[in-house]
Image: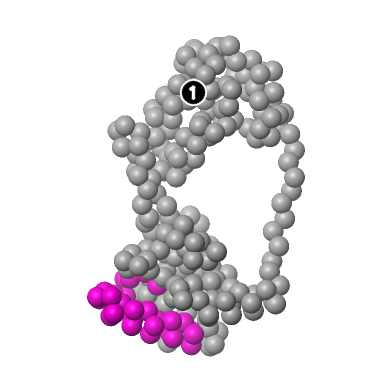
Amino acid sequence: MSLKNWAYICLNNYCVASIQGNTYIAYERLIRMHFGELRDMPIGRITNLIVQNHITKLSRLVDEMVFEYAVQNNLITHNPANGVRIPKTGIFENRAITKEEADRLIQAVRNSDCLVMFSVILCLFTGLRRGEILGLKWCDVDFERRSISVNKQLVREYKINIGGEAKMHYDTKQPKTKNARRTIHMIEPLAKEFEEYKEKLLQWKAENGFVHSEDDFVFPSKINTGLGFKTFYRHYQ
């Protein structure tokens, strides 16, 4: 049996019941993109040296679970990835934008025709993450108390059908950790601009035939649903 065929058996039998759609897609992408010349090799002929050479070329580790499951099912007697050394990669350091860059970014947002780009200003002044920003609903915003309740985030989900085809949709989920659920205070200038954004958004809804609800997303798509990550980045870029 080839490594590729066995990997898909592992994915669709061992993994699919216990992982989320995003993880399934990530594992499937590993099979398609990172197995390289090992994909079509019989799994019983793959040696430690072959895996080491392949890893050195990729500078990243092929998920070892495929080999471990092969050992458990007596396709091979040992895991050829055991003992493989991972080459060190360069260290990427994040850089915070300067105040001058932030000012330019804010001005660009204010000059933008895309209304929901106010989300960038909200992010700069609150530190909210992308999923938290796009998962906000109006019921989470209290202008009287100048507060934002962070209790969910927008996530990209994949539903896997019987044939293994993945269909993507967006949904909201509670944060993974207790500390991620928090209340954020808005300074007065931000709260004022946020209220102005809401007035413009309500006008847009009225013009396009949408009935406003406090359960609506703060930053909606053009059909008044959640704004997808790709659409957000397209506007941002």
The vertical placement of 189 against 126, above or below, is below
The vertical placement of 69 against 159, above or below, is above
Residue 116 lies, in percent from the top left, at: 44, 72
Q: Using the rendered image of the protein, determine whether residue 125 is visible from the camera's viewpoint.
A: no
Q: Using the rendered image of the protein, determine whether residue 7 is visible from the camera's viewpoint.
A: yes
**Badge 1: few (under 14), some or many (20 or more) residues near its Cα, within 10 Å?**
many
Q: Which one is in front, 131 or 83?
A: 131
> What residue is drawn where x is 54% and y is 76%?
109
Residue 124 lies, in percent from the top left, at: 58, 73
Type of amino acid at the residue the image marks with label 1:
Lys
Predominant SS along the magenta part: helix
> What residue is drawn where x is 53% and y is 80%?
111
Residue 207 lies, in percent from the top left, at: 29, 79
> What residue is drawn where x is 53% and y is 71%?
120
Q: Which residue is mark 1?
A: 4
- The region drawn magenta spans 191-218
Write down the quadrant of residue 227 in the picture: bottom left
Q: Which one is in front, 2 or 88?
A: 2
Q: Is residue 178 magenta?
A: no
Secondary element type, mark 1:
helix
Q: How many marks?
A: 1
Q: Is residue 213 magenta?
A: yes
Residue 82 lies, in percent from the top left, at: 65, 23
- The colour scheme of the drawn protein is one colour
Image quadrant occupied by the C terminus: bottom right
**Left or right: where 62 falls relative to 131:** right
**Left or right: where 94 falls relative to 167:** right
> What residue is drawn where x is 50% and y is 13%?
75
The vertical placement of 227 against 56, above or below, is below
